[in-house]
Image: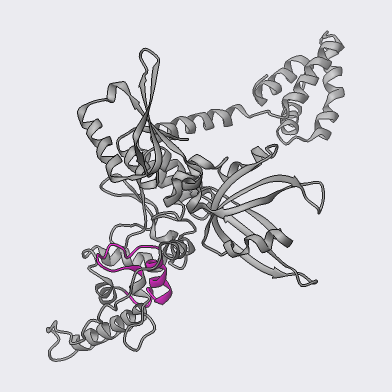
Amino acid sequence: TVYQEQVMLLSQKLANFTKGQADMLRKGMGKKKKDIIDALYPKFIEGGESNGHPKEVLDKVWKDWEAFASYAFNKSHSTCYAFIAFQTAYLKAHYPAEFMAAVLTRNKNDITKITFFLRECKAIGLTVLGPDVNESLSDFSVNSEGHVRFGLSALKGVGEGPVEAILEDRENGSFKDIFDMMRRLNLRSVNKKVMESLVNGGALDCFEGVSRSQYFAPSEKFDTLVEHALRYGNAYQNQKAQSSNSLFGDSEDIMIPEPKMPEQPPWPLIEELNREKGVTGIYISGHPLDDYRLEIENFTTCELENIENYKARQSINVAGMLTNARHLISKNGNGWGFFEISDYSSSIEFRLFGNDYQKYKHLLEQGKVLFITGKYEQSWRGDEMEFKVKEISLLEGVASEKTEAITIKIPLNKVNPELIDAIDKLCKTHKGKHRLHMQLLDYQNKISLKMVSTDRKVKADNDFIKEIARLQLDYKLN
């Protein structure tokens, strides 16, 4: 038995169930209501025996049906789901960008799902771009180059009203800068909160030569350029409205000078990304861990979302950015803390007490990227297991400390003068303390030849690894 409809039909054939009784049996199975199923059992046995079927056979059929009830499915529903699955699989295969844009829009209010689908975009080779006032639509969309573009309405603090105002006025041409926006937009819809969210989310990054920090820098008597620009836009629009009602209404000369762009150094990457995450819920333009891929890929046990799969291990290495740090004092005056680290996929929380807290508290500042060794132990609060930290260090120095050599793996069919020259140049520009090994791979004959350089050492850091990847070669740290 596979479908509920089969149970309905068999109950009528075997035990003379009426259509109403058969439907009641279906409901009992579909809703997992054992009382309904049990109430129909005597009627099934009675009807089956009256048709000449042995009781032991009827009991076997009923027992199978009871087990079947735990996964019973409606045939018409399964047909519909199969059809939808085929359609969506076709769309994802042939129109991946459009499909993923629709999926992201459907789940834009669920950050966990958004994060999952953004990782899926990356896995299938799609580029997801941040919001852009000159290109984004209200929801996720696909631009002319086939990239997925973040929707403006997905930014916190930017409602449908401001988005509609931006999209409507954009039909008259792209915005040139923030002052052009202020002159053109309906400033009753686009207020200070909206503009700050757009800036923090990167939606104004399309205006070249202006960093996000400049929009928040003091401008003349105003606390931020955003406030100054809004005041300028209101004054411009008011003067334009007044001039249109004057004798010189045809004049387009509005004598209000644009504010000057204040000088301000760009924010540190971590601040820019944290502000971005504050309005989007995720990191879009980058991730604080991007500069530590070498360490993460080679020296960690797993990503944080999979850490519970390694509970039996005596030692677990993980890495992440400290996203929450609470330094506290106990009743007896001892310091302790409650902390959280996050990586690309998830986060974990941990506590430190006593000597462990005193030993590592100087590293436990929000925004620092840490390498943590620990293991799962039974919690003092009960039988549950919790992650206990054994050692903490900055992730930045882990690769240098733990790496002794690097092996570059070169398929034999890729060897040519250009590749040899590229590797030679790479090694000359990245001199360091790590030994250099080469491994020639002949996949056809299943032969591997390992070689060690006796007079050349390299600096096997992230920059070196990026160049190795650009040459489409694999590597291994030793």
Give, as a single range, the part of the protein colored magenta.
186-212
Q: Position of residue 362 (x, y in %)?
A: 59, 65
Q: Residue at x 39, y 76 (%)?
A: 191
Q: Residue at x 61, y 57 (%)?
A: 340
Can you see residue 149? yes
Q: Is residue 220 magenta?
A: no
Quadrant of res 255: bottom left
In the image, farthest residue toward the bottom: 247
Q: Position of residue 256 (x, y in %)?
A: 21, 86
- Residue sitting nearer the eye, 226 or 447: 447
- Residue sitting nearer the eye, 301 or 87: 301
- Residue sitting nearer the eye, 145 or 236: 145
Q: Count the marks: how many?
A: 0
Q: Position of residue 434 (x, y in %)?
A: 41, 41
- Placement of 54 over or under 421, stated as above or below: above
In the picture, the quarter occupied by the N terminus is top right
Quadrant of res 234: bottom left
Magenta: predominant secondary structure element?
A: loop
- Placement of 99 over or under 112, stated as above or below: above
